[in-house]
Amino acid sequence: MASKRQTTMAKIAREQAVRERRARKQEKRDKKKAARAEKGAEATGAATEATGAATDAPTGSEVEEERGV
């Protein structure tokens, strides 16, 4: 029967550092994605305003009201 080997504090610290680094990278990716989406929405909104086109799509709150939420 093999005995379990204890994880050293150094290994635990390395693993924690990797998890934190990955979390920071994911946050950066999310921020970039949100910025691109916002920039795209602004460009689309500006184009809609320039052409004078109106949107008939319901907003999020209107959809919730229809569902009874």
Image (cartoon, rainbow, N blue to C red):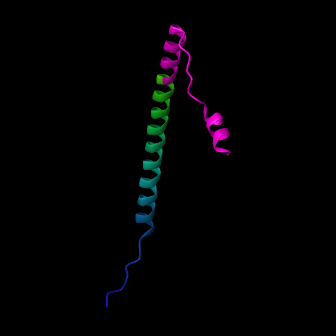
Quarter the N terminus occupies: bottom left
* 52 versus 38 height, above or below: above
- Whether residue 24 is in magenta: the answer is no
| Residue at the image position 54 percent from the left and 9 percent from the top | 52
Predominant secondary structure in magenta?
helix
**Quick one: which residue is furthest to the left in this view?**
1
User: Depth check: 45 or 2 in front?
Assistant: 45
User: Depth check: 64 or 32 in front?
Assistant: 64
Give x and y (percent) for residue 35.
49, 29
Give x and y (percent) for residue 42.
52, 20
Q: Is residue 13 left or right of residue 54?
A: left
Q: Residue 63: which quarter of the image?
A: top right
- Whether residue 63 is in magenta: the answer is yes
| Residue at the image position 37 percent from the left and 82 percent from the top | 4
| Residue at the image position 45 percent from the left and 28 percent from the top | 36
Give x and y (percent) for residue 34.
49, 33
**Magenta segment:** 41-69
Give x and y (percent) for residue 12.
44, 64
